[in-house]
Image (spheres, grey):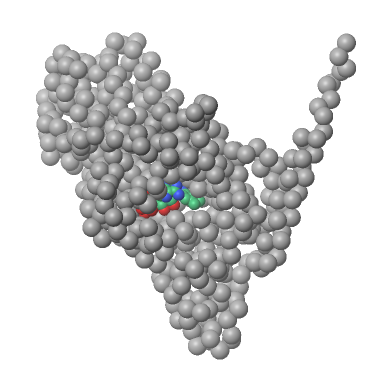
Amino acid sequence: MKVARRPSLIWFRRDLRLADNPALHAAAEGGGPVAAVYVWSPEEEGDWPAGAASRWWLHHSLARLEAALVRRGLQLLICRGTAEWVLPRLARQLRAAQVCCTRRWEPAALRQEGLVAEALAQTGIGFWVAEGSLLCPPDRVEKTGGGPYQVFTPYWRAAAPGIRPGLALRVPALRGLRRWPAALDLQALGLLPRPDWALGLREAWQPGEAGAQQALVSFVAQGLAGYPTGRDLPGEEGISRLSPHLHFGELSPAQIWRAVDGLPGSAAYERQLGWREFGHQLLHHFPLTPDQPLRPEYGAFPWGGDPEHLRAWQQGQTGYPLVDAGMRQLWQTGWMHNRARMVTASFLVKHLLLPWQAGARWFWDTLVDADLANNTLGWQWAAGCGADAAPYFRIFSPARQGERFDPQGVYVRRWVPELAGVPAAWVHRPGEAPAGVLSEAGVVLGRTYPWPIVDHAMARQRALAALGRMKAISRASVATPRIPAAPPA
Ligand SMILES: Cc1cc2nc3c(=O)[nH]c(=O)nc-3n(C[C@H](O)[C@H](O)[C@H](O)COP(=O)(O)OP(=O)(O)OC[C@H]3O[C@@H](n4cnc5c(N)ncnc54)[C@H](O)[C@@H]3O)c2cc1C
């Protein structure tokens, strides 16, 4: 659509890239100069404003985006305040014809979009919203009889054939404003941690579009073909590590799809992208699930673990090497391998009997890829209370998981260096190792590495008993007829 040659505003949200960005294209196609804006409004994210690790990532991603825009003669106007307050004012000040953005599907973000639409409509400024953050937006796939899918396989069978990412959009030619209004300096948002604990994050990641493109290219060249078998092995480089780039929209899912589609390994990889889509459609249809179980009977689950155990779990001091390796990888790099996420989450809710919401909050604060849809999906899966979840009665043994997916202990040795000298046969169960093996490896249980904080067999029985109590409570509440307060007349 051509509009008068007044400026267009591109409102960057979770699409922090220039390539394959339909909103940026729409702004450029307006024919006038383009002004780029980012609005920092954590209060509009409901109960889930970005956690500390995500804020670190966001700072660097914005810095890279700003630099890329400056190279094209644009500035990134950084603003603070609610979007429905900032955008109409800025658009009026610039005499802009339209505001363009990419849709975010989280419930709070859709609410924000609605408020912006209303505010802009009142001022007569156009509002153009593109899809682009998902491959199949949640309103496009539903069961034959209506309603959202709650099981992944039929969902993916229905959704995948409709995915046609189309041709990639190049970075459009952009013309900036002649005079730029005052805006905030990125530093003023205070996104970086004080004191600075982010060394491990800096060493592990390159936020921004260029880093995302590099990660994609190297995964396609080196990782994709081996992905179907390698993806489950946390000690190997068998996965893409694209999750934070995807979350912040430094890459679109369509760009990834185009890069992998048809290559060896792509079906398994595309299926994992499908879990991301599934997570978003669940969050869309069940917006309370970040805090509440999708299966209501789990609202009565008798949690009752020891709060001290939460701290041991957070610090990677549980005495279960695979759990500790995962939690320390998370703390040091802001990311954790999927297999370790499954085991650490399961350990918290089943071995320690602590509520999944406490784990989800910790992940939210410490993950650079913290994503409301995926994190909710993962935690409800681990706790057995979500859609297509692991049944609660199936309780991972962390030692056996380690032996199966990290047989040589490569992952454990990397993140739990005090166990580096323990032979593979014992590295996942140092508590059971002969004294001679431990002393040769320099391990003194209780001093250099903790004893297991709970006994696996006891914890398993306790978890199953708790599940039984929950079922009894939910049966009783179904069986008890509701008695009206007063007999009907
Ligand atoms: C308890 C728990 C919490 C999680 N929290 C998050 C989170 O906050 N943010 C997040 O992006 N992922 C989360 N996941 C899903 C998964 O662990 C990560 O997406 C994955 O580890 C990211 O690494 P990768 O990019 O190398 O994945 P790859 O294996 O290379 O997969 C490619 C992409 O597919 C998507 N994907 C892969 N597996 C899943 C999955 N199980 N569910 C949803 N999407 C998936 C991701 O976008 C990922 O980047 C969680 C999983 C669990 C069990």
The image quarter containing residue 183 is top left
Q: Position of residue 173 (x, y in %)?
A: 11, 31
146 to the left or right of 39: right
Q: Is residue 201 above or below residue 454?
A: above
Observer-nearest residue: 449 or 168? 168
134 to the left or right of 170: right
The image quarter containing residue 320 is bottom right
Q: Is residue 198 above or below residue 35?
A: below
Residue at figure coordinates x 51%, y 26% from the top left: 146
Q: Position of residue 310 (x, y in %)?
A: 59, 56
Q: Is residue 136 above or below residue 57?
A: above
From the image, which quarter does the N terminus lie in? top left
Residue at figure coordinates x 16%, y 36% from the top left: 170
From the image, which quarter does the C terminus lie in? top right
Tell me how many marks there are.
0
Residue at figure coordinates x 50%, y 48% from the top left: 378
The image quarter containing residue 196 is bottom left
Q: Position of residue 29 (x, y in %)?
A: 16, 23
Q: Position of residue 137 (x, y in %)?
A: 39, 31
Residue at figure coordinates x 58%, y 72% from the top left: 450
Asked if residue 250 can be seen in this view, the reply is: no
Asked if residue 431 can be seen in this view, the reply is: yes
